[in-house]
Each structure stands twice: as C-alpha cells, then as structure tokens.
Amino acid sequence: MLSFFSPSNIFVYLNKVIEFLNSIIFIVLVVALTFALVISPPDYVQGNVVRIMYVHVPAAWISLAIFSIMTFSYIINYIFRIKNLLIINYSIAPIGLLFTALAIITGSVWGKPTWGTWWAWDARLTSMIVLMFFYIALILSLKYLNDERIKLKVTTTLSIIGFINVPIIRYSVDYLNTLHQPTSLKITGTSTIHTSFLLPLFLMLLVFLIYSALIFLMKYKTEIIKMKKKRLKNYD
C-alpha cells in the first residue's frame, strides 16, 4: 500500500495525468470557442461584447478559488507542518496571479463599451486589484524569504488577511456602490443569466480548469524534482 505513494509511482501518475490533459485540452478548447463565438447568441443589450464574459467570469472564479485553496493550505500547513502543501502553494500561486490579471484586463476591455471608460475605482475592480497585490506579495515571499519559519509565518498571515478580501469581491456588486452589474448566476435564488449563455460559459470554465491543472502539475513536478536534487546534493 505504501509503495503506491512512492516518489517513482507519483511521477508515473503525474505523467499520465499530464499526458491525458494534453490530449483533451485542444478538443475542449475548440468546442468551447465554437459555442462562445459562433453558437452563443449576442446579448440584446450588449450585443457581441457580452462574449468577453466567457473569459472574464471563469478567470475571476478561478482566481478566487485558487486564493481560497492557498489560504486553507497555509492554515493546515501551519498547524500540521505538511511541507508538500507549501510546494503546492508555490506551484499554484502564479496561476492565480495569471487569472487575476486576466480578469482585471478583460473587465477593463468589457468596461470600455459598456461603461464608457477603461477603468473605474468601484468596489469590484478595486478589490480585484487588491487581490492581485496579495498574490504578488505571496509569490515574492515564497521566492525570496530563505528562513522557512519566517516564510511560513509571513505567507500564512498574508493569505489569511488576503482571504478577507475574497467575500468582499464576491458580494461587492450586491451590497456596495459599484458600476459592475449584480451577480447573474446564483447557487441559491433565481439566476438572471439566460441558459443560452450558460453552456459556453461553463465550457470555457472547463478549458481554464484543464489549463490550470496542466500548468500546476508540470510546475509541481518540477518543484519535486528540484527538491530531490537539493537533498541529494546535501548528502554529497
């Protein structure tokens, strides 16, 4: 049973998952883009500009999800000292930053034709910028802090403080003064987004999730290899 979790087996499974994701991502992307750009109808108010939603919304969702996962991982690691969680966070943080930047950029592009301006310091946009700075601070701390104890304390503190911003981002359009439209897709309650927009939205979300998993696994694999080489070097 323990042999299942041996490093050699883990690398075999990692390679298999990476190969599988590589084999399907292009197909899923083509299908998603077909629905997003061709089959999906234009919005009756925004017209074809609404298609930016298929990139903007999934990017924002993944950005918030990754920061939440990182915060949970840091708390668990701080309590139980599971070093592997630090490697996971180190591997996933740049992906979160990428999607945060993508959400901000596409939001700005979307804002120009709908609001008449590229940028407005409203609640949603400002809180997303704050999230991006927390991502940057975490990545820099992970990269440049050498003392493991200090690194753990700083990154855990940053993630917990930054996590306070996550519900602010989520509910800012409903309870704060913002140009951003209210939440259209709701888990509880009535969603205001038409079903013709839901399929391409979730297909694009699937594309981004596959891409995120692919990049994460490759980065995670690289970090494991680096760690093992460092250990071997120390033994010499």
Image (cartoon, helix red, strand yellow):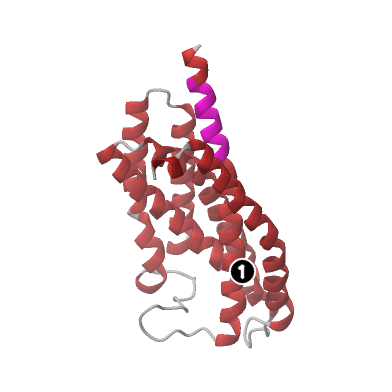
Q: Residue 142 is drawn in which quadrant?
A: top left
Magenta span covers which residues? Answer: 220-231
Please, which residue is most extreme toward the top here? 236
Q: Residue 77 is drawn in which quadrant?
A: top left
Q: Is residue 173 visible?
A: yes
Look at 44% across and 76% down and name the residue there. 183
Look at the picture and state if 127 lies above or below 44.
Answer: above
Look at 48% across and 85% down and name the residue there. 192
**Picture coordinates of residue 119 (x, y %)?**
57, 60
Relative placement, left or right, of 189 versus 55 is: left
Q: Residue 47 is drawn in which quadrant?
A: bottom right
**Picture coordinates of residue 170 (x, y %)?**
40, 66
Screen quadrant of the N terminus: top left
Verify whether residue 230 appears in magenta: yes
Q: Which residue is mark 1?
A: 204
Look at 44% across and 51% down and name the residue there. 131
Tell me the element at label 1: helix
Residue 219 or residue 187, whichever sits in front: 219
Look at the picture and state if 78 lies above or below 145.
Answer: below
